[in-house]
Image (cartoon, grey):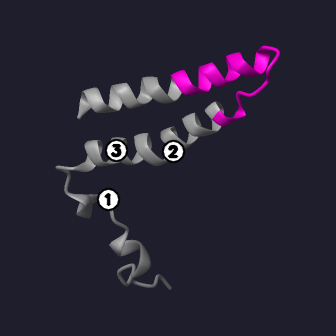
Amino acid sequence: MKTVLTLTLFLALGLIGYGYYLNSSATGSGEKFIGVGVLVFAFVLMPLFIYHRYKNKDLKNYSFKDFANPPDKKKED
């Protein structure tokens, strides 16, 4: 999984870099590559990274169950 994340990161960065290179040249047609690189980063790389980081974690430790219904506190008079 770590190699997939690394390859996807380099792919996204490569697409963005190539898009900027094409924009600086005379053709100026790099917006498509930049857009695809950002989409790969946002919709492929980030979900894979989040899944990789939290796949064996107990997510109950990160919930706000007491935040919605706080325990009753004694009123001080």
Q: Which residue is mark 3?
A: 48
Instruction: Depth check: give the residue in front, 62 or 9.
Output: 9
Location of residue 14 in the rendering, given as x and y in whole percent from the top left corner: 52, 21
Q: Which residue is mark 1?
A: 62
Residue 38, quarter of picture: top right
Q: CA distance from mark 3 to mark 1?
A: 20 Å
Residue interval drawn in magenta: 14-32
> Which numbered disc, 3 or 1, marks the residue that appears first in the sequence?
3
Relative to 62, 1 lies left or right: left
Relative to 36, 74 lies left or right: left
| Residue occupying the point 78% across, 16% down | 24
Location of residue 66 in the rendering, given as x and y in whole percent from the top left corner: 35, 74
Q: Secondary structure at mark 2?
A: helix
| Residue occupying the point 78% across, 14% down | 25
Q: CA distance from mark 1 to mark 2?
A: 23 Å
The amino acid beneath tag 2 is: Ala
Relative to 22, 77 lies left or right: left
